[in-house]
Amino acid sequence: MNAKLEYCGNYLEIANFRYYPEEENRGNPYNTDFDIKVVSDGFSGYSQYWEYDHRELADFIGQLEDLMYARVNEVVLQEIGVGQRIFFKGDGQGHISVSGTIHSDNVISQSLTFEFVTDQTVFPSFIAQLKEL
């Protein structure tokens, strides 16, 4: 399953979502992984195997909903393996920037630093797709 946030040709996609409930039941926070695809102003990057704690997904989704309604100014999606982060920052008037640096599977070899602006109208479908994960 995938979840895609797209606006004016730019996008961030959570792809190949994999959840391991047996690992979560053992208390292992490395119980989910997914890939990140980004296209930003014609540049693109692909980062494999973002490690994540599935229990944090509902919290992240709730924070995105708060950002969409301008109840918070910033939300961070942080990978727990090597600490990659993607920032979602709102201006309180419906504009939301998406920024970060993603790395290829070999952190040293390739990376993409990106930023693009969206608006709150594209978040409901992205949030709904995240909830399906």
Image (cartoon, rainbow, N blue to C red):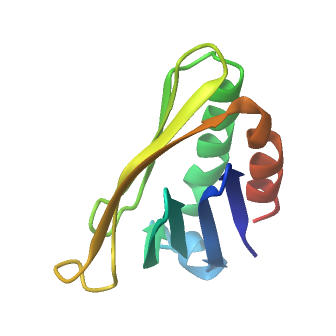
Q: Is residue 57 above or below residue 106?
A: above
Residue at the farthest front position: 42
Position of the N terminus, as image quadrant, is bottom right
Where residue 69 appears, as percent x and y from the top left, is 71, 20
Position of the C terminus, as image quadrant, is bottom right
Q: How many marks?
A: 0
Question: Considering depth in this image, is 76 or 98 the residue closer to the camera?
Answer: 98
Where residue 82 appears, as percent x and y from the top left, is 27, 67
Residue drawn at x 25%, y 85% is 106
Residue drawn at x 67%, y 49% is 8
Question: Is residue 117 at all visible to an observer of this figure?
Answer: yes
Q: Is residue 38 above or below residue 125?
A: below
**Direction from residue 28 to residue 24 in the image, left or right:** right
Where residue 127 appears, as percent x and y from the top left, is 76, 47
Residue drawn at x 69%, y 28% is 68
Question: Considering depth in this image, is 126 or 65 the residue closer to the camera?
Answer: 126
Where residue 21 appears, as percent x and y from the top left, is 65, 76
Question: Is residue 28 at all visible to an observer of this figure?
Answer: no
Residue at the farthest left position: 108
Q: Quadrant of residue 20?
A: bottom right
**Direction from residue 115 to residue 20 in the image, left or right:** right
